[in-house]
Image (tube, coloured by chain):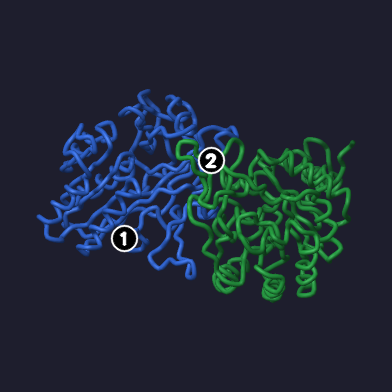
Chain colours: A green, B blue
Amino acid sequence: MTTTMKSAMKPDMTVNLAGIPLRNPVMTASGTFGYGQEFAQYVDLETIGAFVTKGLSLNPRAGNPTPRIVETPGGMLNAIGLQNVGIEAFIAKKVPFLRTVKTPAIANFFGNTVDEYAEMTRRLDEIPEVAGLEINISCPNVKHGGIVFGTDPDSAASVVSACRAATKKPLIVKLSPNVTDVVVMAKACEAAGADALSLINTLTGMAIDLNKRRPVLANITGGFSGPAIKPIALRMVWQVAKAVKLPIIGIGGIMNATDALEFMLAGATAVQVGTASFINPGAAQTIAEDMEAWLIANGVADIKSLIGALET
Amino acid sequence: MQFTSLIISNVEVSPGYWRMRMTAPPECASAQPGQFMMVRVNGAIDPLLRRPFGIFDVGTHVPAQSGANSQPYLEMLYRVVGKGTAMLATLHETDLLDVLAPLGKGFDLGEVEEEKLIVGGGVGLAPLYLLAKELVATSKVRLFAGGRTRDDILCITEFERLGVECYTATEDGSLGERGLVTEALVRRLDELQGKATIYACGPHGMLNAVAGIAAKRDIPCQVSLEGYMACGVGACLGCVAPGHTHSPETPDFRCVCTDGPVFESGELKWRD
């Protein structure tokens, strides 16, 4: 009897992300979790909702010179420059590991041109281990591709349309906060056939070394992440959730279960944990467990009831 | 692995340089020379990221009170350079730290009986003490320690106690020879006529010079690198160093945290 009672009290943590069933809403953010395998000794991958790969491109990319990273109060700047192994090495060396994990793997990718985005979509569409695709149109650290497409609604729409035509897999578009109105971008991606939106990517920032009179990062500017950006991310998720019908993945400075649940109230169906995984490699698992504990403590039977439940 | 560590001691060994001893789980007793740890200074969000430190020493802590179990400890030698390390220097015995260790690939101990030449610049000595401790069991070991002033020459007595012959050089001449420690290294290599292995850790300029000396004489040389890193586990890609085949067209970046921090000097790209 006791067992039945207990299991009856266990909240439903599952959410559906544009056709991808997640055991809970906690995902890992691209670029903060390698290709999954790097974290296998710190996180039981079967305890999180999904994980997202480092951004992939057709050819391997060297990335930017160092220093690539600097810490600032409550956050960090990075200018990695999308260093990645390229699609061929991903298929040969990284996909076999994905086969061993039941948790959905989302492939984040980018291109230099609309055609490259479409070609990457075709390549990733052929990989059964990839549950969904996340289009990166918002990397602030590279000259071509990335943010060029992420700051203009027509360019974003052309990328999303081209990718849409190349796959039936769930297509997530990762939005940049470095725009005047994120809602305009969100609507453009929705109209072009996106299945879900993830936001926010990093904010462009910089740090200066006074004594050297030089920028700290070799790239001069970098993407700002960490707990300092959470209020901005929450605001943008809330704005976009009101404006589009697509499920939203909330990202930005999530350090704990409280942060994650706040994003759900603001309208997110799922969340991505990013910088927190650098500090505690087990952060995503801890956050998922603590979210469940919060639901139990607060008598919430189904986590889906929190999505967009903000009272204003 | 991630664990909570109890600080056993935290003392300033030279102006601006501190040595901290902390408890560690049994898995850390077998930490290799050259491996490192990522330390979270406190639970707040500023400083946000962990700080990487080379493992200076590993041993067994026997608590003073009778009946308490002995336990492995880790030591780190650190320089106060910014906000995070300044906070570390304020910590005391019985304070707690959140630690990831042991991380990375350590030194290869090389051929037994060949002379081992260890080169350290300033706080670069940090990962070299545990190395010297292991090397003296089988080989003749010499240490070449360099710094700007005598304050940058750390823990020489500890090396001497191991039976390591120590040479020092400072840029201002306040301890040992005036000049760069690589000059003493070159003299010793001339005497040995090539039969030796070099291990080095320190400022990049010094490593660049040592790698050049080793390459010219075709002597095996391992270097331990520093890097700005957020995670220490190969995910952030912040700490990369260019490998020897690196070019913008054929990227060959190595992660200091997981491919290193110790590399054969020939694996990396150096300035000519």
The label shown at residue A214 is none
Residue B201 lies, in percent from the top left, at 32, 48
Q: Quadrant of residue A171?
A: bottom right
Residue A51 seen anywhere in this rendered image of the structure: yes
The label shown at residue A208 is 2
Q: Residues within 10 Å of mark 1 (few under 14, many from 20)?
A: few
The quarter of the image holding the C terminus of chain A is top right
**Dot 1 amino acid type:** Asp
Give the side of residue B57 with respect to residue A87, left or right: left
The residue drawn where x is 75% and y is 50% is A179
**Dot 2 amino acid type:** Ile
Q: Quadrant of residue A138?
A: bottom right
Give the side of residue B58 with respect to residue A124, left or right: left
Q: Are marks 2 and 1 on the same chain?
A: no
Q: Secondary structure at mark 1?
A: loop
- In this rendering, the count of numbered labels is 2
Residue A27 lies, in percent from the top left, at 69, 53
Q: Chain of mark 2?
A: A
The label shown at residue B272 is 1
Task: Say if A86 sits above or below B207 in the image.
Answer: below
Residue B256 lies, in percent from the top left, at 43, 54
The residue drawn where x is 49% and y is 36% is A210
The quarter of the image holding the N terminus of chain A is top right
Task: Say if B104 sits above or below A157 in the image.
Answer: above
- The one nearer the camera, B236 or A255, is B236
Q: Chain of mark 1?
A: B
Q: Secondary structure at mark 2?
A: strand
Q: Between marks 2 and 1, how big is the CA–CA gap?
A: 29 Å
